[in-house]
Image (tube, rainbow, N blue to C red):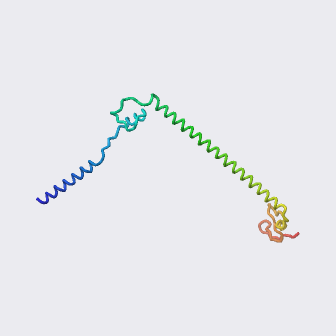
């Protein structure tokens, strides 16, 4: 008898616990999708219940289409503004690169002009072209063809 009493008490406790859990969860009724679309199309507040609706839309006929057109026009204007800003940035970067290139060329030419006036001590060791655009240092062995080595003549 004691054993059956424990089983009944456990079953009763589990039942009460289950009821408490189920009762504590808020019940949410989902509204139909067609009603949600109707509220959007009519410009009605999202909290409006179907039973409280008078059957009239707040916006004038074609209001939703006008809002869509306005949104598309706004988006097109924004895309055009972004494209213009990107074009201006590309032009600015191209101009900046052109100026840097000009400065580099000016500096290169200025440096080269200072080298032209040098004594040419480093250049005096080169004898001249030896075949295909190669220069021969004086007093060094050079290769002619594949197998023959000669001593470079001194002037």
Q: Residue at x 80, y 61 (%)?
A: 133
In this rendering, position of residue 149 left or right of residue 73: right
**Dividing the image into 4 quarters, which one contains the N terminus?**
bottom left
Q: Residue at x 32, y 41 (%)?
A: 29
In this rendering, position of residue 151 left or right of residue 10: right
Q: Position of residue 144 (x, y in %)?
A: 80, 66
- Front residue (pair 95, 49): 49
In the displayed orientation, state which residue is furthest to the top.
Answer: 61
Asked if 17 appears above or below 46 in the picture, the reply is: below
In this rendering, the count of numbered labels is 0
In the displayed orientation, state which residue is furthest to the right.
Answer: 155
- Front residue (pair 47, 143): 47
In this rendering, position of residue 131 left or right of residue 6: right
Q: Position of residue 90 (x, y in %)?
A: 65, 46
**Dividing the image into 4 quarters, which one contains the C terminus?**
bottom right
Q: Residue at x 47, y 30 (%)?
A: 63
Q: Position of residue 88 (x, y in %)?
A: 64, 44
Q: Quadrant of residue 78?
A: top right
- Front residue (pair 119, 18): 18
- Front residue (pair 48, 29): 48
Q: Residue at x 35, y 36 (%)?
A: 49
In this rendering, position of residue 129 left or right of residue 38: right
Q: Position of residue 31 (x, y in %)?
A: 35, 38
Asked if 24 appears above or below 62 in the picture, the reply is: below
Q: Quadrant of residue 153?
A: bottom right
């Amino acid at each position: 008898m004691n054993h059956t009493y424990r089983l009944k008490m456990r079953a009763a406790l589990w039942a009460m616990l289950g009821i408490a859990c189920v009762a504590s969860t808020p019940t949410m009724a989902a509204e139909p999708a067609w009603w949600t679309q109707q509220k959007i199309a009519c410009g009605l507040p999202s909290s409006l219940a179907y039973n409280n609706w008078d059957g009239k839309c707040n916006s004038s006929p074609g209001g939703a289409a006008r809002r869509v057109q306005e949104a598309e026009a706004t988006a097109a204007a924004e895309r055009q503004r972004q494209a213009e800003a990107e074009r201006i940035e590309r032009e600015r970067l191209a101009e900046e690169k052109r100026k840097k290139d000009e400065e580099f060329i000016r500096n290169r030419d200025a440096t080269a002009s200072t080298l032209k006036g040098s004594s040419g001590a480093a250049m005096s060791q080169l004898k001249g072209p030896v075949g295909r655009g190669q220069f021969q240092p004086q007093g060094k062995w050079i290769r002619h063809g594949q197998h023959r080595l000669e001593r470079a003549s001194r002037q």
